[in-house]
Image (spheres, rainbow, N blue to C red):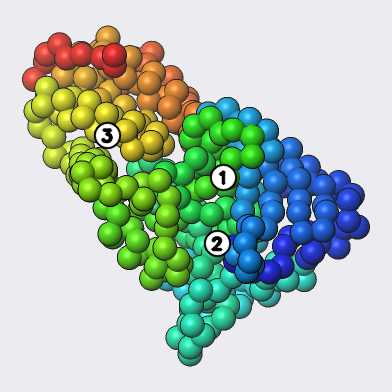
Amino acid sequence: METTTTTLASTSTQPSGQPIQMFDCMIHLMPNKMWYKKFMVKPIKGKEYKGVSLSAAKNIAKGEIILTECPIFTLPFDRDHMAVTGGLMACNSEYKRMFYDMFNCHDETSKMTREMGIFATNGIPCGTDFGSGRVADREGVFVISARINHSCVPNVHGQWVDWVQQIEQRATREIKNKEEICRGYIDLLKPRAERQKELLAKYWFKCDCPACKLTGAELEASDARRKKIRELLDKHHDGKCTDATQGLEEIRLALDCIEKEGLPMYESIFYFFAFHLCAASSDYPNAREWAKKARDSHLMFCGPTLEDLYNRLIADPGCYPDADSMTGRTLWGPT
Ligand SMILES: [Zn+2]
């Protein structure tokens, strides 16, 4: 989250206007504004300083990586002041300065020191993966990703890549030149009232994204769709679906809700659930088609981490541990 008056440009030791290589992006440093190959960081216009935002510097394709970034440092969710200051001690002076430039939306108390507040305001989970179901056990502070503002209909999705210890921000849809780049700070499958409550408590702002601006019947429908996606995600994740035909109908409903809510990063996990039901029902032809959809969707929004696994399932659905575990039947594939 970014609402400080200091930009990255002003914290850098590089002379203004000189391009430098930072993470995987070429940065051209200018006073209060930076241009990258794919996005630029600039102050939000207004009478008062309202922080900075990231905007596309070109048309960006769906699935395109806009940023790959290492954290300043990471810590477990269960951390105290000593842990945060210990992490900071391992950083060089430039990273320390960048850390202290970040916004702290928490009041300073003995239980929430300034360092803990900055970490809590800007920390991003390292490890959450919708495709594999893996949940992060650590958070990291990222200099640029922390400057990406929130939307409940984000146009980028951050994926932690464990083996290189980096986060990749990928476009969830086509982004037009100059359009603001936004990511989701919280669980987006909650209804608006809960999202707003959480954003206010954790980050101290009121979201006015397209989903939060809805009123009346449109708001009710949006809340119901997000609730349904969450309900079905939990049900299928926990293996509570014992009727393959009903399960596939539910997956069709979930995919429809995902499309209407503009949250395509949730697609691949439902494609995998559909693969599971078809393989478990010994319907290998349709299992292959769902596995292809899961592979391609995960590749687009989360990267190649599961590509080999999906290719093995496509080549031989019978090697899946749950294959043939339900009553055999012919189901259906993606349309
Ligand atoms: Zn919102």
- Local packing at callout 1 (Cα closer than 10 Å; few below 14, some 14-19, many 20+) is many
In terms of sequence position, does the residue under pointer 1 or pointer 3 come before the other? 1
- Residue 63 percent across, percent down from the top left: 53, 30
Q: Secondary structure at mark 2?
A: loop
Image quadrant in which the N terminus is located: bottom right
List the residue tagged with mark 1: 181
List the residue tagged with mark 3: 257
Identity of the residue drawn at 63% across and 30% down: 59
Q: How many marks?
A: 3
Q: Secondary structure at mark 3?
A: helix
List the residue tagged with mark 2: 1
- Residue 116 percent across, percent down from the top left: 52, 76
Identity of the residue drawn at 59% across and 33% down: 176
Image quadrant in which the C terminus is located: top left
Compared with 175, 144 (above or below) is below
In terms of sequence position, does the residue under pointer 1 or pointer 2 come before the other? 2
Identity of the residue drawn at 50% across and 57% down: 124
Residue type at mark 3 is Cys
